Amino acid sequence: MSDPLVVDAGEYETEELLTTLEQGQRVIVRTEFLGSEHEVTLRHDGETYYCDTPTRLHKHDSAEEMRECLEQQGYSEQ
């Protein structure tokens, strides 16, 4: 497995992140929440998209659901 792409929240556009995930690469998004930095791991297994946050694992069944998550959570630039 290749090293994950590490980015700051908002550094990449939504479609760039989706393309990277669909190519099988994991993405670690560094984000700030309540004054401290957190990492969110994004991945795609060919069927399901995952957002693994420090407190919860979110699963998305479609690219559209993942796109909405990336934008709503501020992980991508819209």
Image (cartoon, rainbow, N blue to C red):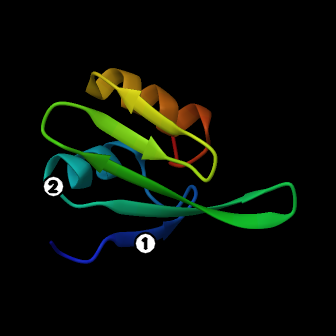
Secondary structure of residue under mark 2? loop
Residue 56: horizontal and vertical position, in percent? Answer: 57, 40
Q: Disc 2 marks which amino acid?
A: Gly
Say which residue label 1 marks.
6
User: Mark 2 Cα within 10 Å, few/some/many (few <14, many 20+)?
Assistant: some
Q: Residue furthest right?
A: 35
The residue under the point 61% across, 53% down is 54
Q: Is residue 48 above or below residue 12?
A: above
The residue under the point 80% across, 66% down is 36
Q: Earlier in the sequence, mark 2 or mark 1?
A: 1
Residue 8: horizontal and vertical position, in percent? Answer: 56, 66
Q: 74 or 24: which is nearer to us?
A: 24
Residue 40: horizontal and vertical position, in percent? Answer: 52, 56
Q: 70 or 53: which is nearer to us?
A: 53
**The N terminus sits in image quarter:** bottom left
User: Residue 30 has which mark?
Assistant: none
Q: Is residue 10 above or below residue 44?
A: below
Q: Disc 1 marks which amino acid?
A: Val
Residue 41 horizontal side relative to residue 31, left or right: left
The residue under the point 24% across, 32% down is 48
Residue 59 horizontal side relative to residue 7, left or right: left
Say which residue label 2 marks.
24
Secondary structure of residue under mark 1? strand
Q: Is residue 57 above or below residue 64?
A: below
Residue 1 horizontal side relative to residue 64, left or right: left
The residue under the point 47% across, 26% down is 68
User: Mark 1 Cα within 10 Å, few/some/many (few <14, many 20+)?
Assistant: some
